[in-house]
C-alpha cells in the first residue's frame, strides 16, 4: 500500500470516530491531534498540516450534517474532503498520439518512467516511439533502448550526435504517423542554467503537447521547490512522482507538488513496468482512508483479462458449469495483478484489514500450489473435475510435487467456489422472477 504508515494512522482516526458514543469537543480535539501527527510523520509541511486540522475543527463545530446523516459520518466526510483538498485538482489526460517531453534531475527514475508510460500507452492501443536525447549519459540511452524492446515500442537515437535538439529533430522526421513520441532528456544534480538551456532548445524543436517532470517521492517537501523551478523555467503540464510505494516522505512530496499548481498525473507504485497509475486524488484518498477503490481494481481486470474468456468464465460460474479450467483463468488474472496486499487495498472494508505478512505469504503460496496442480492435470480433468479420484489424485500430486491431501483441498476449494457462485446466481434469478410476477399481477405483494 502506498504511504502505508500514513494510511494506518488515518484509518485509526476513523476507527476512533466509529467507536465513539458521541462527537463532542474532546473527541474533535483528539481527532485533530491524531491527524496532525499522522500528516507530520508523512512529511507534510507543518503549516499545511496545521491549517488542514484547523479547518477540520472549525467545520466540525460549525457545520451541521445533512438530513439523514449521523454526526460521526459527517465528521468522516469532513476529514476526507480536507485531505482530498491538499492533493490538488484532477486533470484529465487522454491517451492518444501526442508529443511528450520528459524533464527531471539525475537519479529520479526518469528513463524508467518513460518506459512505464510507453507501456501504459501500448496497453491502451497507442503506438509509441521512444527517443533517447540524453547526450551526456550513454547508459541512459542503452537503458531506454532495452525498455523499448520490453514494452514493444519503437526507438530512435543517434549516439554520435551531441546536440539533443538535433536528435529530436531527426526523430520527428522519421516518426510514423499516429504515434506517441516520448522524449527522454538529460538530468543534472540540480536545476542549473545548462540543463534549462538544453531543455528549452529541445522544447523549441519538439513543440510538445505535454511537458512532464519526473520526481522521486523520497525528496519530500523539496519536490515542491524542484517542481516550481521547472515550472518557471520550461512550463509543466504534469508531474509524475516515482517510488511512492516505499517513501516515508511521500505525503510531503504529494502535497508540496500540488501546492505549486503543477498537476500530478501519474504515480509510480513499484519497480515493474506495469506499476504506474493515473493519479486521481479522490480515489487515492479513498484508498488511503481504507474506503477502497473498486474502480481501479476493475480497470486492472479490464487490462489483464481477455474479454471473451472472462465473459465465458463469468457465465460458467453463474450457471454452475464452473470448471477447473475456468478457475485457472481466474488465478492467472489475479497473479498478474500483483501482491495480495495491493489488491486488498482496493476493496472497501479491506483497506484497513489486519492481514499480517505471514498470512499474506501463506495465501500466495497456497495459490501457487493450486496453479502447479492445475498445470499437472489433463484437458479432460480440467473440464470435468468430477473424474478426479484415487489414482488421478496421486498422479497430479506427484506431477506437481504436492501431497494428495493438497489436491483434495484444491478440489474442495473449487467445489465451494462453484456452489457459492451458482447460489448467488440462483437467488438473483429467483428474485427477478418474483419481481416480474409481481409486476404482472400474478402474485399479491
Image: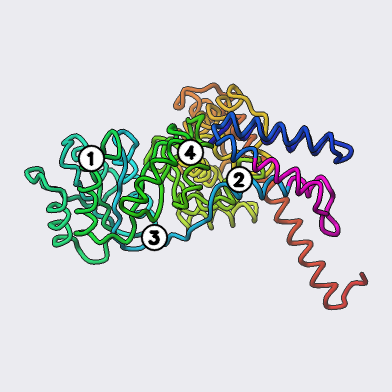
Magenta span: helix, strand or loop, mainly? helix
| Residue 17 pos. (x, y %) | 79, 38
Name the residue located 55 percent from the left edge and 25 percent from the top edge: 361
On the rendered image, what quadrant is the N terminus found in?
A: top right
| Residue 76 pos. (x, y %) | 74, 45
Q: Secondary structure at mark 3?
A: loop
Q: Secondary structure at mark 2?
A: helix
Between 389 and 425, the residue placed more toward the observer is: 425
Between 163 and 181, the residue placed more toward the observer is: 163
- The residue singled out by tag 4 in the image is 253
Answer whether residue 375 is visible to the viewer in this image. Answer: no
Q: Is residue 320 left or right of residue 168?
A: right
Q: Earlier in the sequence, mark 2 or mark 1?
A: 1
Please tell me how crowded label 4 is: few (under 14), some (14-19), or many (20+) other residues with Cα within 10 Å.
many
Compared to 224, does 353 lie above or below? above
Answer whether residue 428 is visible to the viewer in this image. Answer: yes
Between 393 and 304, the residue placed more toward the observer is: 304
- The residue singled out by tag 1 in the image is 146
Q: Earlier in the sequence, mark 3 or mark 1?
A: 3
**How far is disc 3 from disc 4 in space, using C-alphas?**
25 Å
**How far is disc 2 from disc 1 in space, using C-alphas?**
35 Å
**How far is disc 3 from disc 1 in space, using C-alphas?**
23 Å
Q: Are marks 2 and 3 in contact (CB under 8 Å)?
A: no
Amino acid at each position: 500500500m502506498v504511504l502505508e504508515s500514513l494510511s494506518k494512522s488515518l484509518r485509526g482516526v476513523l476507527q476512533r470516530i466509529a467507536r465513539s458514543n458521541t462527537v463532542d469537543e474532546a473527541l474533535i480535539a483528539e481527532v485533530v491531534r491524531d491527524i496532525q501527527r499522522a500528516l507530520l510523520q508523512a512529511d507534510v509541511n507543518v503549516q499545511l498540516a496545521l491549517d488542514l486540522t484547523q479547518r477540520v475543527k472549525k467545520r466540525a463545530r460549525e457545520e451541521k450534517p445533512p438530513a439523514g446523516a449521523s454526526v460521526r459520518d459527517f465528521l468522516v466526510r469532513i476529514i476526507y474532503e480536507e485531505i482530498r483538498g491538499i492533493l490538488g485538482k484532477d486533470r484529465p489526460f487522454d491517451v492518444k498520439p501526442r508529443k511528450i517531453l520528459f524533464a527531471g534531475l539525475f537519479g529520479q527514475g526518469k528513463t524508467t518512467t518513460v518506459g512505464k508510460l510507453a507501456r501504459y500507452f501500448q496497453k491502451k492501443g497507442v503506438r509509441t516511439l521512444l527517443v533517447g536525447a540524453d547526450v551526456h549519459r550513454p547508459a541512459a540511452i542503452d537503458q531506454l533502448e532495452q525498455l523499448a524492446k520490453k514494452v514493444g515500442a519503437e526507438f530512435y537515437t543517434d549516439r554520435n550526435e551531441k546536440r539533443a535538439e538535433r536528435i529530436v529533430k531527426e526523430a520527428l522526421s522519421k516518426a510514423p504517423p499516429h504515434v506517441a513520441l516520448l522524449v527522454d532528456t538529460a538530468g543534472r544534480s540540480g536545476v542549473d542554467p545548462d540543463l534549462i538551456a538544453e531543455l528549452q532548445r529541445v522544447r523549441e524543436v519538439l513543440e510538445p503537447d505535454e511537458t512532464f517532470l519526473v520526481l522521486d517521492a523520497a525528496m519530500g517537501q523539496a519536490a515542491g521547490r524542484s517542481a516550481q523551478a521547472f515550472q518557471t523555467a520550461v512550463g509543466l503540464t504534469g508531474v509524475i512522482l516515482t517510488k511512492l510505494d516505499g517513501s516515508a516522505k511521500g505525503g510531503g512530496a504529494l502535497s508540496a507538488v500540488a501546492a505549486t499548481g503543477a498537476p500530478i498525473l501519474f504515480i509510480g507504485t513499484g519497480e515493474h513496468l506495469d506499476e504506474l497509475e493515473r493519479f486521481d486524488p479522490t480515489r487515492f484518498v479513498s484508498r488511503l482512508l481504507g474506503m477502497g477503490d473498486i474502480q481501479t481494481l476493475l480497470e486492472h481486470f479490464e487490462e489483464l483479462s481477455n474479454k471473451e474468456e472472462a465473459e465465458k468464465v463469468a457465465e460458467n460460474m453463474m450457471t454452475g458449469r464452473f470448471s477447473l479450467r475456468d478457475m485457472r483463468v481466474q488465478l492467472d488474472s489475479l497473479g498478474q495483478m500483483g501482491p495480495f496486499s495491493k489488491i486488498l487495498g482496493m476493496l472497501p472494508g479491506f483497506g484497513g484489514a489486519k492481514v499480517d505478512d505471514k498470512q499474506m505469504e501463506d495465501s500466495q503460496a497456497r495459490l501457487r500450489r493450486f496453479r502447479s496442480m492445475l498445470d499437472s492435470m489433463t484437458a479432460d480433468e480440467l473440464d470435468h473435475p468430477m473424474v478426479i479420484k484415487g489414482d488421478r489424485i496421486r498422479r497430479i500430486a506427484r506431477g506437481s510435487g504436492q501431497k494428495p491431501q493438497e489436491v483434495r483441498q484444491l478440489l474442495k476449494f473449487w467445489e465451494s467456489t462453484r456452489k457459492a457462485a451458482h447460489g448467488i446466481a440462483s437467488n438473483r434469478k429467483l428474485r427477478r422472477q418474483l419481481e416480474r410476477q409481481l409486476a404482472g399481477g400474478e402474485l399479491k405483494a
